[in-house]
Image (tube, helix red, strand yellow):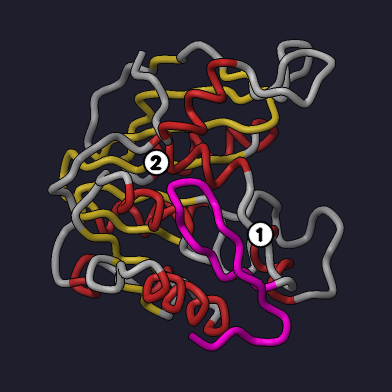
Amino acid sequence: MNILENERINIINEDLKLIENKDSLTFGTDAYLLSAFLPKRSRDIGVELGVGSGVISLLALTKKKCAHVYGFEVQSNIASIAKRNAELNNLSDKFSIINEDLRNVNSSTIGCEADFVFSNPPYMKSNSGKQNDNENKNASRHEIFGEINDFCACAKRLLKFGGNFFVVYRPDRMIDLIYALRSNGLEPKKLTFIHANSSTPPSLLLVSAKLGGKGGLTITKPIYIYKNGTQEYTEEYQKIYDTCEVEEI
């Protein structure tokens, strides 16, 4: 396995080995929470939009949350890392990485309709926030290769009727996300707010939506990551971290 000069290998929970590029965004809480948010559907076909290093899909496969994942990544150098991570963890037969712009794909691209789609999309509009000189980081944070509506539209094209789309996003853009979901026939069904601790406003949210679903949104109890005034995980988050599962409400 070739490791380039600007890369490193990290060992994360579930004993996964992860090649990460020092010049791109690295594995974080949002990625782990999304992988935990996915239900166990061991026979299902999943699709990830914006694969990055591949960690969310690798966690999903390791925890038997699906049978196979097709992952789309527009940046060729990042797609290469995801492919090598699949090889490094002996999951190449279950994780197919496709170097393609998600705005150009549909179910015929993978030869089937997906049971579920998931994504940790860029949170910032292309003309907002501090721009990063590093192209990889800038594309991971900003909507350079597709706005949130493009991600939702792609999920619609890939999903079978009744399939689910799972997203981790920022609360300040929740309205944009909900609007984009509904505009593409994806009805929000469950929403969970993520807080650093019980004294702070939410910093992330998790949403599941159903293609062709009826109206009716369940807002679950919030998830607090740290105990107040400490960097110690709450019992709830520690359990999520240990099991890679969010308790069903």
Q: For label 2, count other residues whose C-alpha is less than 10 Å away and answer few (under 14), some (14-19) or many (20+).
A: many
Residue drawn at x 69%, y 69% is 24
Q: Nearer the viewer, residue 114 or 53?
A: 53
Give x and y (percent) for residue 130.
Answer: 86, 58
Mark 2 or mark 1, which is nearer the start of the sequence?
1
Residue 70 locus on image (x, y percent):
30, 66
Q: At x 61% / y 25%, what residue is drawn?
A: 194
The answer, for residue 123, to whether it is visible in the render is yes
Name the image quarter holding residue 197: top right
Confirm whether residue 52 shows in the render. Answer: no
- Identify the element where label 1 is drawn: loop
Q: What numbered label is drawn on residue 166?
A: 2
Reply above or below: 68 against 85: above
The answer to which of 5 and 30 lies nearer the viewer is 5
Residue at x 42%, y 80% (from the top left corner): 99
Please name the residue shown 17% across and 45% down the image.
42
Res 166 quadrant in image = top left
Q: In the rendering, at what x and y percent does residue 127 appear?
A: 78, 60
Q: Name the residue tied to disc 1.
A: 26
Instruction: Tell me: 106 left or right of 118.
Output: left
Instruction: Identify whether 163 is placed above or below 202.
Output: below
Magenta segment:
1-21
Please check the rendered image and state whether residue 8 is part of the magenta-colored stretch, yes or no.
yes
Residue 44, above or below 18: above
Label drawn at residue 181? none
Image quadrant occupied by the C terminus: top left
**Horizontal and vertical percent position of residue 2:** 54, 88
Amino acid type of the residue tagged 1 in the rendering: Thr
Kind of residue at badge 2: Phe
Badge 2 marks a residue whose secondary structure is strand
